Amino acid sequence: MKQENKNFTKILSIIFILLIITAGIFVFFSPQFEKNIPKVILKNDIYWNMKQNLKLSIFDQSGIKSYTIIYKDSKSQEILASKNISTRQTNLNVEIKAPRINNIFKVDEIILSIEVTDNSKWNFLQGNTFKKEYKIKIDKQAPIANVINNSYNIKRGGSALVVVEVKDKNLKDKYILFNNKYRFELFPFYKKNHYIALIAWPVDVKDFRIFNLFAIDKANNITKTKIPLYIRKLKIKKDKINISNDFINTISLNVLEQSNHEIPSNNKDIFIEANKIIREENISFIRKTSLEYMSKDLITSFNIKAFRRLRASRTFASFAQKRSYFYEKEKVDEAWHLGMDWASVKKAKIYISNDARIIYNDYLGIYGNTIIADHGLGLQTLYAHLSKSNVQTNQEVKRKDKIGNTGSSGAVFGDHLHFGVLIQGIEVNPIEWMDKNWIKTRVLDIIKDAKKIMRQK
């Protein structure tokens, strides 16, 4: 009998041990007992202007049970947010409002203490808790952003120059924006906290609204200053161009093949693919390349000369011609001509008018063999349809150097040079930059007068 009781007791002990082990395994591996603390996304050492709410993100797989956010400075403490959450939420976005404390205007740095607990049964049913203190720098002062000098006016499709002062101890970004869409970078100029930029009114934008200077600090304080410019209209010439099957089969097809595009099944679509789709890709690529490789060096002087036309050439197309393309009497596309087309003898020599660094030298779709040269201050020139190049990418060239020969590569029949002028990747009117007096009064004199103003400050 005693032996039976011993065996029974032994069996019960084994069962009890197995139950404990099973329970332990269940607790260890069960999602209800997960051991990961909640994840909180808020950068440390950030800046706060105390006007906009700080945004906090919380994540936890078992669900968020509660959170508390406490404000602390050297003299006070306040709960900014505290909440118990009854429904299961695995992610939560919390906006932290600034406290209403009088002495907040005197502090430069505060502490945000954040505590978050999840719904896990781990830690004796208490859950996992995240605790951390974040240093927050207080900055309520907006940046200084003043226009020092600028060109008197700007013409549609044309350029202007602006010199500005931008100052803030926590400056994050600065730029000029046209019509709240087109961004122009600022280059350091002559003296600390001063900047310069060439800006452009794209020819395909009919309505001029405004150029604004923006300065933004790390606390997201923003200063916006209008750049005063009178505007001038541009006479637009409209052309109708009939597209033949011969052009499509010899020119458009070749552009598609060299650009590694699929060939559509009919001539109309072949032309549209080459003239519209590849054109859009090319213009986008030019803009990207220009912005990526333009020189951002300090500008102390800008000794640009008037650009010269191709020697002994005739003009066959001008800037801002709006072309409508017809195939078998149907209008199939339209596009802007964004440069000057000059023709001389076949394979005429091309000489550059100003010192530059070559930032592109390759085949480029409808433009054919193309060179883009950077002259500094976001000003670049483009040479297209070449038969030969005499330069390499990243090469420094001097004024009057031969850089290539004209040709008929790309989407053209005859030998000629397409010459374009770019301002931060936007093609502008070359006629302005070929005019010595325009360069003096709209660019060089603006720089000279800006320096005088800066020296007097």
Image (tube, rainbow, N blue to C red):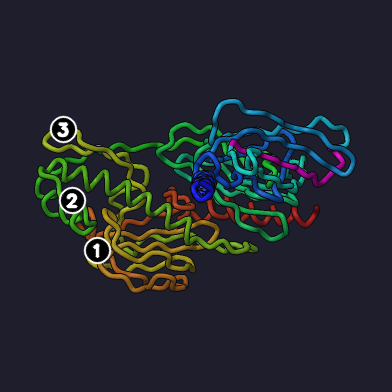
> Mark 1 to mark 3: distance in Å?
30 Å
Report whether residue 189 is seen. Answer: yes
Lower sequence index among marks 1 and 3: 3
**Viewer-proximal residue, 75 or 454?**
75
Mark 3, other Cα within 10 Å: few <14 / some 14–19 / many ≥20: few
Q: How many labels does the image show?
A: 3
Q: Locate residue 242: give its quadrant.
A: top left
Say whether residue 412 is visible: no
Q: Nearer the viewer, residue 333 or 306?
A: 333
Q: Judging from the image, what secondary structure is the residue with disc 2 in?
A: loop
Q: Name the residue rendered at 62%, 62% in the picture.
A: 299
- Please give left or right for residue 109 compared with residue 66 in the image: right
Residue at mark 3: 330
Which residue position holds label 1?
407
Q: Closer to the N terminus: mark 2 or mark 3?
A: 2
Seen in the picture, residue 87 relative to 36 is either above or below; the reply is above
Let me know if residue 110 is in the magenta part: yes
Magenta-colored segment: predominant secondary structure: strand
Range of residues picked out in magenta = 104-119
The relative height of residue 85 versus residue 317 in the rendered view (above or below) is: above
